[in-house]
Protein backbone atom coordinates (compact mmCIF):
# COMPACT_ATOMS: atom_id res chain seq x y z
CA UNK A 1 0.00 0.00 0.00
CA UNK A 2 2.77 2.43 1.04
CA UNK A 3 4.73 1.63 -2.09
CA UNK A 4 1.62 2.25 -4.12
CA UNK A 5 1.02 5.68 -2.54
CA UNK A 6 4.64 6.62 -3.07
CA UNK A 7 4.40 5.70 -6.76
CA UNK A 8 1.25 7.80 -7.09
CA UNK A 9 2.91 10.77 -5.36
CA UNK A 10 6.01 10.48 -7.53
CA UNK A 11 3.87 10.11 -10.62
CA UNK A 12 1.89 13.27 -9.85
CA UNK A 13 5.13 15.19 -9.24
CA UNK A 14 6.35 14.11 -12.65
CA UNK A 15 3.00 15.15 -14.12
CA UNK A 16 3.20 18.64 -12.67
CA UNK A 17 6.73 19.30 -13.82
CA UNK A 18 6.03 18.11 -17.36
CA UNK A 19 6.35 21.33 -19.27
CA UNK A 20 9.38 23.52 -18.94
CA UNK A 21 8.87 26.79 -17.09
CA UNK A 22 11.43 28.81 -18.94
CA UNK A 23 10.83 32.47 -19.58
CA UNK A 24 11.80 32.63 -23.28
CA UNK A 25 13.15 36.16 -22.96
CA UNK A 26 15.79 34.96 -20.48
CA UNK A 27 17.25 32.38 -22.86
CA UNK A 28 20.56 32.91 -24.62
CA UNK A 29 18.89 32.55 -27.96
CA UNK A 30 16.37 35.29 -27.24
CA UNK A 31 19.24 37.69 -26.74
CA UNK A 32 20.73 36.58 -30.03
CA UNK A 33 17.37 36.94 -31.76
CA UNK A 34 17.11 40.48 -30.40
CA UNK A 35 20.49 41.37 -31.89
CA UNK A 36 19.60 39.59 -35.11
CA UNK A 37 16.34 41.53 -35.32
CA UNK A 38 18.27 44.82 -35.15
CA UNK A 39 20.38 43.65 -38.08
CA UNK A 40 17.58 42.67 -40.43
CA UNK A 41 14.52 44.63 -39.39
CA UNK A 42 14.99 47.27 -42.07
CA UNK A 43 16.06 44.96 -44.81
CA UNK A 44 13.60 44.95 -47.70
CA UNK A 45 11.95 41.66 -48.54
CA UNK A 46 13.01 42.18 -52.13
CA UNK A 47 16.65 42.38 -51.00
CA UNK A 48 16.39 38.90 -49.52
CA UNK A 49 15.25 37.65 -52.92
CA UNK A 50 17.98 39.58 -54.76
CA UNK A 51 20.60 37.97 -52.55
CA UNK A 52 19.33 34.44 -52.94
CA UNK A 53 17.82 33.36 -56.24
CA UNK A 54 16.84 30.07 -54.58
CA UNK A 55 14.98 31.74 -51.74
CA UNK A 56 11.61 30.34 -52.79
CA UNK A 57 13.03 26.79 -52.79
CA UNK A 58 14.88 27.36 -49.50
CA UNK A 59 11.84 28.64 -47.66
CA UNK A 60 9.14 26.42 -49.16
CA UNK A 61 7.95 23.23 -47.58
CA UNK A 62 5.77 20.52 -49.00
CA UNK A 63 3.37 18.40 -47.05
CA UNK A 64 1.48 15.81 -49.16
CA UNK A 65 -0.33 17.96 -51.74
CA UNK A 66 0.15 21.24 -49.89
CA UNK A 67 2.90 23.76 -50.55
CA UNK A 68 3.79 26.28 -47.87
CA UNK A 69 5.84 29.23 -49.01
CA UNK A 70 7.50 31.13 -46.18
CA UNK A 71 9.83 33.06 -48.50
CA UNK A 72 7.91 36.33 -48.32
CA UNK A 73 8.71 36.71 -44.63
CA UNK A 74 11.28 39.02 -43.07
CA UNK A 75 13.80 36.34 -42.23
CA UNK A 76 16.86 34.49 -43.34
CA UNK A 77 18.29 31.03 -42.78
CA UNK A 78 20.05 32.39 -39.69
CA UNK A 79 16.69 33.52 -38.26
CA UNK A 80 15.30 30.03 -38.56
CA UNK A 81 18.46 28.49 -37.10
CA UNK A 82 18.08 30.73 -34.06
CA UNK A 83 14.46 29.72 -33.67
CA UNK A 84 15.44 26.09 -33.88
CA UNK A 85 17.76 26.72 -30.94
CA UNK A 86 15.13 28.70 -29.04
CA UNK A 87 12.65 25.86 -29.43
CA UNK A 88 15.27 23.44 -28.12
CA UNK A 89 15.96 25.66 -25.15
CA UNK A 90 12.22 25.77 -24.43
CA UNK A 91 12.09 21.95 -24.57
CA UNK A 92 9.68 21.74 -27.45
CA UNK A 93 10.34 18.08 -28.33
CA UNK A 94 9.72 16.94 -24.77
CA UNK A 95 6.51 18.99 -24.64
CA UNK A 96 5.25 17.49 -27.89
CA UNK A 97 5.88 14.01 -26.51
CA UNK A 98 4.05 14.85 -23.28
CA UNK A 99 1.05 16.00 -25.24
CA UNK A 100 0.92 12.98 -27.54
CA UNK A 101 1.41 10.51 -24.70
CA UNK A 102 -1.28 11.82 -22.37
CA UNK A 103 0.78 13.98 -20.01
CA UNK A 104 -1.42 16.24 -17.90
CA UNK A 105 -0.13 19.33 -19.64
CA UNK A 106 -3.39 21.22 -19.02
CA UNK A 107 -2.02 21.90 -15.56
CA UNK A 108 -4.62 24.34 -14.24
CA UNK A 109 -7.41 21.88 -14.97
CA UNK A 110 -5.24 18.87 -14.18
CA UNK A 111 -6.06 17.23 -17.49
CA UNK A 112 -4.30 15.50 -20.33
CA UNK A 113 -4.68 16.94 -23.82
CA UNK A 114 -5.33 14.13 -26.24
CA UNK A 115 -7.31 15.43 -29.20
CA UNK A 116 -4.61 13.82 -31.35
CA UNK A 117 -5.83 10.41 -30.11
CA UNK A 118 -9.25 11.21 -31.58
CA UNK A 119 -7.74 11.17 -35.05
CA UNK A 120 -5.31 8.33 -34.43
CA UNK A 121 -6.82 6.28 -37.23
CA UNK A 122 -3.95 3.77 -36.92
CA UNK A 123 -5.70 2.80 -33.66
CA UNK A 124 -2.31 2.11 -32.07
CA UNK A 125 -2.76 2.11 -28.27
CA UNK A 126 -2.51 5.37 -26.33
CA UNK A 127 -2.49 4.97 -22.57
CA UNK A 128 -3.94 7.37 -20.08
CA UNK A 129 -3.71 6.36 -16.43
CA UNK A 130 -3.10 2.78 -17.49
CA UNK A 131 -6.07 2.61 -19.87
CA UNK A 132 -5.87 2.44 -23.64
CA UNK A 133 -8.09 5.35 -24.68
CA UNK A 134 -8.28 4.03 -28.23
CA UNK A 135 -10.70 1.33 -27.09
CA UNK A 136 -13.38 3.79 -26.02
CA UNK A 137 -12.63 6.10 -28.97
CA UNK A 138 -13.16 3.17 -31.30
CA UNK A 139 -16.52 2.39 -29.69
CA UNK A 140 -17.69 5.97 -30.18
CA UNK A 141 -16.47 5.94 -33.80
CA UNK A 142 -18.61 2.83 -34.39
CA UNK A 143 -21.60 4.44 -32.69
CA UNK A 144 -21.19 7.57 -34.84
CA UNK A 145 -20.86 5.52 -38.00
CA UNK A 146 -23.93 3.40 -37.33
CA UNK A 147 -26.04 6.39 -36.31
CA UNK A 148 -25.02 8.61 -39.22
CA UNK A 149 -25.56 5.79 -41.73
CA UNK A 150 -29.11 5.38 -40.42
CA UNK A 151 -29.73 9.11 -40.80
CA UNK A 152 -28.31 9.17 -44.32
CA UNK A 153 -30.09 6.07 -45.60
CA UNK A 154 -33.39 7.16 -44.06
CA UNK A 155 -33.65 4.26 -41.63
CA UNK A 156 -33.82 6.65 -38.67
CA UNK A 157 -37.37 7.95 -38.81
CA UNK A 158 -39.09 10.90 -37.18
CA UNK A 159 -42.28 10.62 -35.14
CA UNK A 160 -44.54 10.48 -38.20
CA UNK A 161 -42.43 7.85 -39.92
CA UNK A 162 -40.59 10.22 -42.25
CA UNK A 163 -36.79 10.13 -42.64
CA UNK A 164 -34.71 12.90 -41.11
CA UNK A 165 -33.84 15.70 -43.54
CA UNK A 166 -32.44 18.43 -41.27
CA UNK A 167 -29.88 18.30 -38.48
CA UNK A 168 -29.73 21.22 -36.07
CA UNK A 169 -26.51 21.29 -34.08
CA UNK A 170 -27.10 23.29 -30.90
CA UNK A 171 -23.81 24.30 -29.32
CA UNK A 172 -21.46 27.23 -28.90
CA UNK A 173 -17.72 27.92 -29.04
CA UNK A 174 -15.87 24.70 -29.75
CA UNK A 175 -19.15 22.80 -29.85
CA UNK A 176 -20.25 24.89 -32.81
CA UNK A 177 -17.40 26.67 -34.60
CA UNK A 178 -15.47 23.56 -35.61
CA UNK A 179 -18.27 21.45 -37.08
CA UNK A 180 -19.80 24.50 -38.74
CA UNK A 181 -16.50 25.60 -40.25
CA UNK A 182 -15.85 22.12 -41.66
CA UNK A 183 -19.43 21.69 -42.91
CA UNK A 184 -19.15 24.96 -44.81
CA UNK A 185 -15.66 24.26 -46.13
CA UNK A 186 -16.67 20.86 -47.46
CA UNK A 187 -19.85 21.93 -49.27
CA UNK A 188 -19.07 19.87 -52.37
CA UNK A 189 -19.12 16.76 -50.18
CA UNK A 190 -22.52 17.39 -48.59
CA UNK A 191 -25.05 14.58 -48.48
CA UNK A 192 -27.81 15.52 -50.91
CA UNK A 193 -30.78 14.67 -48.69
CA UNK A 194 -29.46 16.05 -45.37
CA UNK A 195 -28.96 19.68 -44.45
CA UNK A 196 -27.09 20.74 -41.32
CA UNK A 197 -27.84 23.94 -39.43
CA UNK A 198 -25.84 25.41 -36.57
CA UNK A 199 -27.46 27.40 -33.77
CA UNK A 200 -25.19 28.95 -31.17
CA UNK A 201 -26.22 32.46 -30.16
CA UNK A 202 -28.50 32.91 -27.16
CA UNK A 203 -30.17 35.66 -29.17
CA UNK A 204 -33.56 34.05 -29.86
CA UNK A 205 -33.28 35.22 -33.46
CA UNK A 206 -30.78 32.48 -34.18
CA UNK A 207 -32.99 29.58 -33.08
CA UNK A 208 -36.26 31.15 -34.25
CA UNK A 209 -34.99 31.85 -37.77
CA UNK A 210 -33.52 28.37 -38.06
CA UNK A 211 -36.73 26.71 -36.88
CA UNK A 212 -38.61 28.51 -39.66
CA UNK A 213 -36.60 26.49 -42.15
CA UNK A 214 -37.33 23.02 -40.78
CA UNK A 215 -40.19 20.61 -40.23
CA UNK A 216 -40.50 19.09 -36.73
CA UNK A 217 -41.36 15.72 -38.28
CA UNK A 218 -38.05 15.49 -40.11
CA UNK A 219 -35.53 17.34 -37.99
CA UNK A 220 -33.03 16.05 -35.50
CA UNK A 221 -31.43 18.18 -32.80
CA UNK A 222 -27.89 17.42 -31.72
CA UNK A 223 -27.35 19.10 -28.37
CA UNK A 224 -23.60 19.53 -28.35
CA UNK A 225 -22.01 20.66 -25.14
CA UNK A 226 -18.99 19.30 -23.34
CA UNK A 227 -20.32 20.43 -19.97
CA UNK A 228 -24.05 20.43 -20.76
CA UNK A 229 -24.35 23.47 -18.52
CA UNK A 230 -23.51 26.28 -20.95
CA UNK A 231 -26.19 28.96 -20.66
CA UNK A 232 -26.54 29.61 -24.39
CA UNK A 233 -26.74 25.96 -25.40
CA UNK A 234 -29.11 24.92 -22.66
CA UNK A 235 -31.43 27.86 -23.33
CA UNK A 236 -31.46 27.03 -27.05
CA UNK A 237 -31.93 23.32 -26.33
CA UNK A 238 -34.92 24.03 -24.07
CA UNK A 239 -36.51 26.27 -26.69
CA UNK A 240 -35.96 23.61 -29.35
CA UNK A 241 -37.66 21.02 -27.17
CA UNK A 242 -40.61 23.36 -26.41
CA UNK A 243 -41.00 24.07 -30.13
CA UNK A 244 -40.91 20.36 -30.94
CA UNK A 245 -43.60 19.57 -28.36
CA UNK A 246 -45.73 22.51 -29.46
CA UNK A 247 -45.54 21.49 -33.10
CA UNK A 248 -46.95 18.02 -32.50
CA UNK A 249 -44.10 15.91 -31.19
CA UNK A 250 -44.80 14.01 -27.97
CA UNK A 251 -42.57 13.38 -24.96
CA UNK A 252 -41.96 9.84 -26.21
CA UNK A 253 -40.88 11.15 -29.59
CA UNK A 254 -38.01 13.14 -28.08
CA UNK A 255 -35.77 10.08 -28.33
CA UNK A 256 -35.98 10.04 -32.12
CA UNK A 257 -35.45 13.81 -32.47
CA UNK A 258 -32.91 14.72 -29.79
CA UNK A 259 -29.45 13.32 -29.25
CA UNK A 260 -26.67 14.65 -27.03
CA UNK A 261 -22.94 14.96 -27.42
CA UNK A 262 -21.33 15.55 -24.07
CA UNK A 263 -19.03 14.46 -21.28
CA UNK A 264 -21.78 14.95 -18.70
CA UNK A 265 -24.22 12.03 -18.78
CA UNK A 266 -26.00 13.13 -15.60
CA UNK A 267 -27.02 16.47 -17.10
CA UNK A 268 -27.96 14.82 -20.39
CA UNK A 269 -30.39 12.51 -18.61
CA UNK A 270 -31.70 15.43 -16.53
CA UNK A 271 -32.52 17.25 -19.77
CA UNK A 272 -34.58 14.27 -20.88
CA UNK A 273 -32.32 12.66 -23.44
CA UNK A 274 -32.12 8.88 -23.36
CA UNK A 275 -28.54 7.84 -22.42
CA UNK A 276 -28.68 5.52 -25.45
CA UNK A 277 -28.90 8.64 -27.57
CA UNK A 278 -25.78 10.10 -26.05
CA UNK A 279 -22.38 10.23 -27.72
CA UNK A 280 -19.67 10.62 -25.15
CA UNK A 281 -16.30 12.27 -25.13
CA UNK A 282 -13.81 12.92 -22.40
CA UNK A 283 -12.41 15.68 -20.19
CA UNK A 284 -9.06 15.42 -21.98
CA UNK A 285 -10.66 16.95 -25.07
CA UNK A 286 -10.55 20.74 -24.91
CA UNK A 287 -13.71 22.50 -26.14
CA UNK A 288 -11.91 24.23 -29.01
CA UNK A 289 -10.29 20.93 -30.03
CA UNK A 290 -13.50 18.92 -29.78
CA UNK A 291 -14.28 18.92 -33.48
CA UNK A 292 -12.36 15.65 -33.56
CA UNK A 293 -14.59 14.03 -30.92
CA UNK A 294 -18.27 13.11 -31.18
CA UNK A 295 -18.85 16.89 -31.47
CA UNK A 296 -18.25 16.04 -35.14
CA UNK A 297 -21.49 13.99 -35.25
CA UNK A 298 -23.29 16.56 -37.42
CA UNK A 299 -20.43 16.18 -39.91
CA UNK A 300 -20.83 12.40 -40.02
CA UNK A 301 -24.51 12.93 -40.85
CA UNK A 302 -24.05 15.87 -43.21
CA UNK A 303 -20.99 14.58 -45.08
CA UNK A 304 -21.07 10.85 -44.47
CA UNK A 305 -18.81 8.89 -42.15
CA UNK A 306 -16.24 8.14 -44.85
CA UNK A 307 -15.72 11.86 -45.49
CA UNK A 308 -15.41 12.49 -41.76
CA UNK A 309 -12.86 9.69 -41.59
CA UNK A 310 -10.78 11.32 -44.34
CA UNK A 311 -10.79 14.53 -42.33
CA UNK A 312 -9.37 12.60 -39.37
CA UNK A 313 -6.86 10.94 -41.69
CA UNK A 314 -5.57 14.32 -42.91
CA UNK A 315 -5.19 15.56 -39.35
CA UNK A 316 -3.47 12.33 -38.29
CA UNK A 317 -0.93 12.69 -41.09
CA UNK A 318 -0.13 16.19 -39.87
CA UNK A 319 0.18 14.86 -36.31
CA UNK A 320 2.79 12.36 -37.44
CA UNK A 321 4.66 15.09 -39.28
CA UNK A 322 4.58 17.43 -36.28
CA UNK A 323 5.65 14.76 -33.84
CA UNK A 324 8.50 13.36 -35.90
CA UNK A 325 10.02 16.01 -38.12
CA UNK A 326 12.96 18.09 -37.00
CA UNK A 327 12.48 21.86 -36.85
CA UNK A 328 14.05 22.28 -40.32
CA UNK A 329 11.20 20.35 -41.94
CA UNK A 330 8.46 20.87 -39.40
CA UNK A 331 5.75 23.08 -40.86
CA UNK A 332 3.75 23.85 -37.67
CA UNK A 333 6.98 24.61 -35.80
CA UNK A 334 8.14 26.96 -38.53
CA UNK A 335 4.76 28.69 -38.56
CA UNK A 336 5.01 29.03 -34.80
CA UNK A 337 8.52 30.50 -35.07
CA UNK A 338 7.47 33.04 -37.68
CA UNK A 339 4.50 34.08 -35.54
CA UNK A 340 6.76 34.61 -32.51
CA UNK A 341 9.22 36.53 -34.67
CA UNK A 342 6.54 39.06 -35.62
CA UNK A 343 4.72 39.16 -32.29
CA UNK A 344 7.72 39.57 -30.03
CA UNK A 345 10.32 41.25 -32.20
CA UNK A 346 8.36 43.26 -34.79
CA UNK A 347 5.65 43.95 -32.20
CA UNK A 348 2.89 42.85 -34.54
CA UNK A 349 -0.38 42.64 -32.64
CA UNK A 350 -2.48 40.67 -35.04
CA UNK A 351 -2.35 38.01 -37.73
CA UNK A 352 -4.72 37.75 -40.66
CA UNK A 353 -5.90 34.45 -42.09
CA UNK A 354 -7.07 35.03 -45.64
CA UNK A 355 -8.50 32.00 -47.42
CA UNK A 356 -8.95 32.42 -51.16
CA UNK A 357 -11.81 29.98 -50.99
CA UNK A 358 -15.35 31.13 -50.27
CA UNK A 359 -16.25 27.86 -48.56
CA UNK A 360 -13.55 28.50 -45.97
CA UNK A 361 -15.37 31.61 -44.81
CA UNK A 362 -15.48 30.39 -41.19
CA UNK A 363 -11.83 29.32 -41.02
CA UNK A 364 -10.53 32.56 -39.50
CA UNK A 365 -13.42 32.64 -37.01
CA UNK A 366 -12.63 29.07 -36.00
CA UNK A 367 -9.00 29.91 -35.34
CA UNK A 368 -9.97 33.06 -33.53
CA UNK A 369 -11.20 30.77 -30.81
CA UNK A 370 -8.45 28.20 -31.38
CA UNK A 371 -5.70 30.75 -31.05
CA UNK A 372 -7.10 33.50 -28.83
CA UNK A 373 -8.71 31.23 -26.24
CA UNK A 374 -5.51 29.16 -26.13
CA UNK A 375 -2.80 31.79 -26.10
CA UNK A 376 -4.63 34.89 -24.88
CA UNK A 377 -2.87 34.55 -21.51
CA UNK A 378 -0.71 36.83 -19.39
CA UNK A 379 0.30 34.59 -16.49
CA UNK A 380 3.16 32.21 -17.18
CA UNK A 381 3.71 28.64 -16.02
CA UNK A 382 5.47 30.00 -12.93
CA UNK A 383 2.29 31.93 -12.03
CA UNK A 384 4.13 35.17 -12.89
CA UNK A 385 2.76 37.98 -15.02
CA UNK A 386 4.54 37.90 -18.37
CA UNK A 387 6.49 40.94 -19.53
CA UNK A 388 6.36 40.06 -23.22
CA UNK A 389 3.55 39.64 -25.75
CA UNK A 390 1.72 36.35 -26.08
CA UNK A 391 -1.07 35.31 -28.46
CA UNK A 392 -1.92 37.72 -31.28
CA UNK A 393 -5.35 38.90 -32.36
CA UNK A 394 -6.58 36.63 -35.14
CA UNK A 395 -8.91 37.84 -37.83
CA UNK A 396 -9.65 37.48 -41.50
CA UNK A 397 -12.18 37.06 -44.26
CA UNK A 398 -12.06 35.22 -47.53
CA UNK A 399 -10.27 36.87 -50.45
CA UNK A 400 -11.29 38.73 -52.55
CA UNK A 401 -13.91 40.28 -50.24
CA UNK A 402 -11.22 41.38 -47.81
CA UNK A 403 -9.37 43.17 -50.59
CA UNK A 404 -12.30 45.54 -50.98
CA UNK A 405 -12.62 46.07 -47.26
CA UNK A 406 -9.55 46.03 -45.04
CA UNK A 407 -6.51 45.32 -47.22
CA UNK A 408 -5.94 49.09 -47.51
CA UNK A 409 -4.69 49.04 -43.93
CA UNK A 410 -2.46 46.03 -44.52
CA UNK A 411 -0.86 47.73 -47.52
CA UNK A 412 -0.55 51.30 -46.32
CA UNK A 413 -1.48 51.39 -42.65
CA UNK A 414 0.84 51.72 -39.67
CA UNK A 415 0.52 48.18 -38.31
CA UNK A 416 2.58 45.14 -39.25
CA UNK A 417 0.08 42.40 -40.03
CA UNK A 418 1.57 39.07 -41.05
CA UNK A 419 -0.91 37.39 -43.38
CA UNK A 420 -1.55 33.75 -44.24
CA UNK A 421 -2.93 33.40 -47.74
CA UNK A 422 -4.60 30.03 -48.33
CA UNK A 423 -5.72 28.89 -51.79
CA UNK A 424 -6.12 25.86 -54.01
CA UNK A 425 -4.95 24.94 -57.48
CA UNK A 426 -8.26 23.35 -58.43
CA UNK A 427 -11.77 24.49 -57.73
CA UNK A 428 -14.82 22.30 -57.24
CA UNK A 429 -16.74 24.90 -59.19
CA UNK A 430 -16.00 24.97 -62.90
CA UNK A 431 -17.56 28.27 -63.76
CA UNK A 432 -16.05 30.44 -66.48
CA UNK A 433 -12.69 31.88 -65.47
CA UNK A 434 -13.59 32.59 -61.84
CA UNK A 435 -10.88 30.37 -60.45
CA UNK A 436 -7.85 31.68 -62.37
CA UNK A 437 -9.01 35.19 -61.56
CA UNK A 438 -9.37 34.32 -57.87
CA UNK A 439 -5.87 32.85 -57.76
CA UNK A 440 -4.42 35.75 -59.74
CA UNK A 441 -5.74 37.97 -56.95
CA UNK A 442 -4.11 35.75 -54.31
CA UNK A 443 -0.72 35.89 -56.01
CA UNK A 444 -1.09 39.60 -56.83
CA UNK A 445 -1.76 40.52 -53.23
CA UNK A 446 1.25 38.66 -51.85
CA UNK A 447 3.40 40.21 -54.56
CA UNK A 448 2.06 43.71 -53.90
CA UNK A 449 2.56 43.34 -50.16
CA UNK A 450 6.12 42.23 -50.65
CA UNK A 451 7.29 44.58 -53.40
CA UNK A 452 5.22 47.65 -52.75
CA UNK A 453 5.62 50.59 -55.10
CA UNK A 454 8.45 53.09 -54.79
CA UNK A 455 8.14 56.82 -55.29
CA UNK A 456 10.00 56.58 -58.57
CA UNK A 457 7.67 53.87 -59.84
CA UNK A 458 4.62 55.81 -58.74
CA UNK A 459 5.96 58.95 -60.40
CA UNK A 460 6.62 57.30 -63.74
CA UNK A 461 3.15 55.76 -63.67
CA UNK A 462 1.59 59.15 -63.13
CA UNK A 463 3.73 60.66 -65.87
CA UNK A 464 2.65 57.90 -68.24
CA UNK A 465 -0.93 58.84 -67.41
CA UNK A 466 -0.17 62.35 -68.64
CA UNK A 467 -0.41 64.09 -65.25
CA UNK A 468 1.23 67.48 -64.90
CA UNK A 469 4.09 67.93 -62.46
CA UNK A 470 1.82 69.90 -60.14
CA UNK A 471 -0.77 67.16 -60.18
CA UNK A 472 1.94 64.60 -59.51
CA UNK A 473 3.31 66.58 -56.59
CA UNK A 474 -0.16 66.70 -55.03
CA UNK A 475 -0.77 62.98 -55.19
CA UNK A 476 2.60 61.23 -55.29
CA UNK A 477 3.07 60.43 -51.59
CA UNK A 478 -0.32 58.75 -51.40
CA UNK A 479 0.51 56.45 -54.28
CA UNK A 480 3.55 54.94 -52.62
CA UNK A 481 3.43 51.44 -51.13
CA UNK A 482 6.27 50.74 -48.69
CA UNK A 483 6.17 47.02 -49.40
CA UNK A 484 8.01 44.46 -47.26
CA UNK A 485 4.70 43.42 -45.71
CA UNK A 486 5.10 39.78 -44.69
CA UNK A 487 2.95 36.93 -45.89
CA UNK A 488 2.94 33.14 -45.95
CA UNK A 489 1.29 31.39 -48.88
CA UNK A 490 -0.39 28.04 -48.44
CA UNK A 491 -1.32 26.38 -51.70
CA UNK A 492 -3.23 23.11 -51.74
CA UNK A 493 -4.22 21.00 -54.71
CA UNK A 494 -7.94 21.04 -53.92
CA UNK A 495 -9.97 21.65 -50.79
CA UNK A 496 -10.91 18.11 -49.88
CA UNK A 497 -11.46 16.42 -46.53
CA UNK A 498 -7.89 15.27 -46.01
CA UNK A 499 -6.35 18.59 -46.95
CA UNK A 500 -8.69 20.42 -44.60
CA UNK A 501 -7.90 17.98 -41.79
CA UNK A 502 -4.17 18.56 -42.27
CA UNK A 503 -4.56 22.32 -42.38
CA UNK A 504 -6.58 22.43 -39.17
CA UNK A 505 -4.10 20.19 -37.34
CA UNK A 506 -1.23 22.32 -38.63
CA UNK A 507 -2.68 25.50 -37.11
CA UNK A 508 -3.49 23.67 -33.86
CA UNK A 509 0.12 22.54 -33.51
CA UNK A 510 1.40 26.01 -34.32
CA UNK A 511 -0.70 27.37 -31.44
CA UNK A 512 0.52 24.68 -29.06
CA UNK A 513 4.19 25.24 -29.94
CA UNK A 514 3.84 28.99 -29.43
CA UNK A 515 2.25 28.43 -26.03
CA UNK A 516 5.22 26.29 -25.03
CA UNK A 517 7.69 29.01 -25.98
CA UNK A 518 5.60 31.76 -24.37
CA UNK A 519 5.61 29.66 -21.19
CA UNK A 520 1.84 29.77 -20.81
CA UNK A 521 -0.83 27.12 -20.40
CA UNK A 522 -2.60 26.95 -23.75
CA UNK A 523 -5.33 24.49 -22.83
CA UNK A 524 -7.33 26.31 -20.17
CA UNK A 525 -9.66 29.29 -20.67
CA UNK A 526 -10.27 30.88 -17.29
CA UNK A 527 -10.73 34.25 -18.98
CA UNK A 528 -14.22 33.33 -20.14
CA UNK A 529 -15.51 32.51 -16.65
CA UNK A 530 -16.00 35.96 -15.13
CA UNK A 531 -18.39 37.19 -17.81
CA UNK A 532 -20.35 33.92 -17.64
CA UNK A 533 -20.80 34.22 -13.86
CA UNK A 534 -21.81 37.88 -14.04
CA UNK A 535 -24.32 37.17 -16.82
CA UNK A 536 -25.99 34.53 -14.65
CA UNK A 537 -26.13 37.00 -11.79
CA UNK A 538 -27.58 39.70 -14.03
CA UNK A 539 -30.39 37.63 -15.57
CA UNK A 540 -32.89 38.28 -12.72
CA UNK A 541 -31.93 41.96 -12.69
CA UNK A 542 -32.54 42.31 -16.42
CA UNK A 543 -35.88 40.56 -15.92
CA UNK A 544 -36.69 43.14 -13.22
CA UNK A 545 -36.89 40.45 -10.56
CA UNK A 546 -33.87 41.40 -8.50
CA UNK A 547 -32.33 44.63 -7.36
CA UNK A 548 -29.15 45.92 -8.94
CA UNK A 549 -27.88 47.09 -5.56
CA UNK A 550 -24.15 46.61 -5.22
CA UNK A 551 -23.48 46.96 -8.94
CA UNK A 552 -21.30 49.77 -10.29
CA UNK A 553 -22.88 53.03 -11.41
CA UNK A 554 -22.57 52.33 -15.12
CA UNK A 555 -24.16 48.86 -14.88
CA UNK A 556 -26.98 50.26 -12.73
CA UNK A 557 -27.48 53.04 -15.28
CA UNK A 558 -27.69 50.55 -18.12
CA UNK A 559 -30.09 48.29 -16.21
CA UNK A 560 -32.35 51.20 -15.31
CA UNK A 561 -32.41 52.45 -18.88
CA UNK A 562 -33.16 48.95 -20.12
CA UNK A 563 -36.04 48.47 -17.69
CA UNK A 564 -37.45 51.92 -18.37
CA UNK A 565 -37.29 51.55 -22.14
CA UNK A 566 -38.74 48.04 -22.01
CA UNK A 567 -41.92 49.53 -20.47
CA UNK A 568 -42.43 51.78 -23.46
CA UNK A 569 -43.14 48.84 -25.86
O1 LIG B 1 -16.32 29.90 -24.03
C1 LIG B 1 -15.77 28.98 -23.20
C2 LIG B 1 -16.06 27.56 -23.59
O2 LIG B 1 -15.81 26.78 -22.48
C3 LIG B 1 -15.27 27.07 -24.78
O3 LIG B 1 -13.99 26.69 -24.46
C4 LIG B 1 -16.13 25.96 -25.25
O4 LIG B 1 -15.78 25.60 -26.53
C5 LIG B 1 -17.49 26.58 -25.13
O5 LIG B 1 -17.41 27.36 -23.95
C6 LIG B 1 -18.65 25.64 -25.07
O6 LIG B 1 -18.63 24.83 -23.94
P1 LIG B 1 -19.53 23.54 -23.84
O7 LIG B 1 -19.16 22.63 -24.96
O8 LIG B 1 -19.24 22.95 -22.50
O9 LIG B 1 -20.97 23.97 -23.96
Image (cartoon, rainbow, N blue to C red):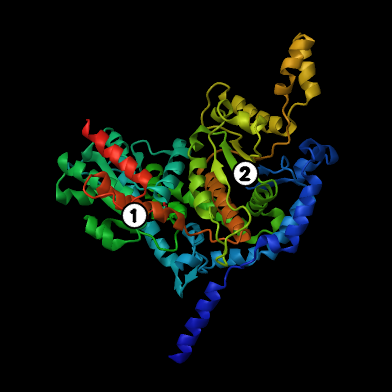
Query: Which of the two discs, 1 and 2, labels the residue nearer the N terminus?
Result: 2
The number of numbered discs placed on residues in the rendered structure image is: 2
Q: Residues within 10 Å of mark 2 (few under 14, many from 20)?
A: few
Q: Residue at 59% x, 36% y: name it.
A: 424
Q: Is residue 21 visible?
A: yes
Q: Is residue 215 left or right of residue 454?
A: left
Q: Quadrant of residue 554?
A: top left
Pick the residue in front: 153 or 232. Answer: 232
Q: Which residue is mark 1?
A: 261
Q: Residue at 67% x, 28% y: name it.
A: 444
Q: Position of residue 206 (x, y in %)?
A: 32, 37
Q: Position of residue 212 (x, y in %)?
A: 26, 33
Q: Which residue is mark 2?
A: 65
Q: Against 28, is 216 above or below?
A: above
Quick check: is the Cβ at mark 2 less than 8 Å away from ligand 1?
no
Q: Residue at 75% x, 26% y: name it.
A: 453
Quick check: is the Cβ at mark 1 less than 8 Å away from ligand 1?
no
Q: Quadrant of the C terminus?
A: top left
Q: Is residue 301 visible?
A: no
Q: Is residue 385 left or right of residue 281?
A: right
Q: Quadrant of the N terminus?
A: bottom left
- Give the CA distance from mark 1 to mark 2: 33 Å
Q: Secondary structure at mark 1?
A: strand
Pick the residue in front: 303 or 34. Answer: 34
Q: Secondary structure at mark 2?
A: loop
Amino acid sequence: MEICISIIVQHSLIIYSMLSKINPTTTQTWEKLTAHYQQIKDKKLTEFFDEDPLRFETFSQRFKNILIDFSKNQLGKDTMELFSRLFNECKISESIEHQFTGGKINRTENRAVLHTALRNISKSPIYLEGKNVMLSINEVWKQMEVFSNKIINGEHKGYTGKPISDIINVGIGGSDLGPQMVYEALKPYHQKRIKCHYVSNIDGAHMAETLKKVNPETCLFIIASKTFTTQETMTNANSARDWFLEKGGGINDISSHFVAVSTNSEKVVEFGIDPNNMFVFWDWVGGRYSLWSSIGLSLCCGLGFSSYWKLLEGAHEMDIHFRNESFENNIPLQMAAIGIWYTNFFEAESEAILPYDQNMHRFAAYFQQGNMESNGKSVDRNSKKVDYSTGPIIWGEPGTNGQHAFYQLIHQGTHTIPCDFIGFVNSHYQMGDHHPKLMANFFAQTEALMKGKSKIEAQSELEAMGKTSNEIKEILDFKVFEGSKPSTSILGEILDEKTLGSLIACYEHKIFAQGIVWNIYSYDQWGVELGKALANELVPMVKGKATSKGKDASTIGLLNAYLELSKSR
